[in-house]
Image (cartoon, rainbow, N blue to C red):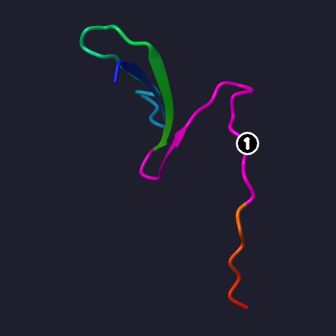
């Protein structure tokens, strides 16, 4: 995929993990956050956050 992966974690010893392609050539970066044992999430540059579309609410009553 020619992408570098940057991972911000909740681990004290390894709070930043960088995964680079073997040939060290990449054209994109993917930023992820990881909250140990709980959650992964994607990160966006300031101003690049996609707009949210309102979801339909499915109420049962």
Secondary structure predominantly adopted by residues drawn in magenta: loop
Q: How many marks?
A: 1
Q: Nearer the viewer, residue 27 or 4?
A: 27
Q: Residue lying furthest bottom in this view?
A: 61
Instruction: Tell me, yes or no, whether the highlighted magenta stretch contains residue 7.
Output: no
Q: Quadrant of residue 13?
A: top left
Q: Going by the image, does 20 lie left or right of 29?
A: left
6 to 25, vertically: above or below? below
Residue 46 is inside the magenta segment: yes
Q: In which quadrant of the rendered view does residue 27 lie?
A: top left
Q: Residue at x 24, y 13 (%)?
A: 22
Q: Going by the image, does 52 lie left or right of 41?
A: right
User: Could you tell me which residue is drawn at 38 percent across and 12 percent down?
Assistant: 26
Q: Where residue 39 sits: x, y (%)?
A: 49, 49
Q: Which residues are magenta?
A: 36-54
Residue projecting furthest to the left: 22
Vertical placement of 23 versus 19: above or below?
above
Image position, residue 51 (x, y; %):
73, 42
Q: Name the residue located 72 percent from the left edge and 25 percent from the top edge.
A: 46
Q: Residues within 10 Å of mark 1 (few under 14, many from 20)?
A: few
Identify the residue position indicated by label 1 in the image.
51
Q: Position of residue 60 (x, y in %)?
A: 68, 88
Between 4 and 52, the one nearer to me in the picture? 52
For the C terminus, the quadrant is bottom right
Q: Position of residue 53 (x, y in %)?
A: 72, 52
The residue sitting at 44% across, 45% down in the picture is 36
- Screen quadrant of the N terminus: top left
Dot 1 falls on a residue whose secondary structure is loop
């Amino acid at each position: 995929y020619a992408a570098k992966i940057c991972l911000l974690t909740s681990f004290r010893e390894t709070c930043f993990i960088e995964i680079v392609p073997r040939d060290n050539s990449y054209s994109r970066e993917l930023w992820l956050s990881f909250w140990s044992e709980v959650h992964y999430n994607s990160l966006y540059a300031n101003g690049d956050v996609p707009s949210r579309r309102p979801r339909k609410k499915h109420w049962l009553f």
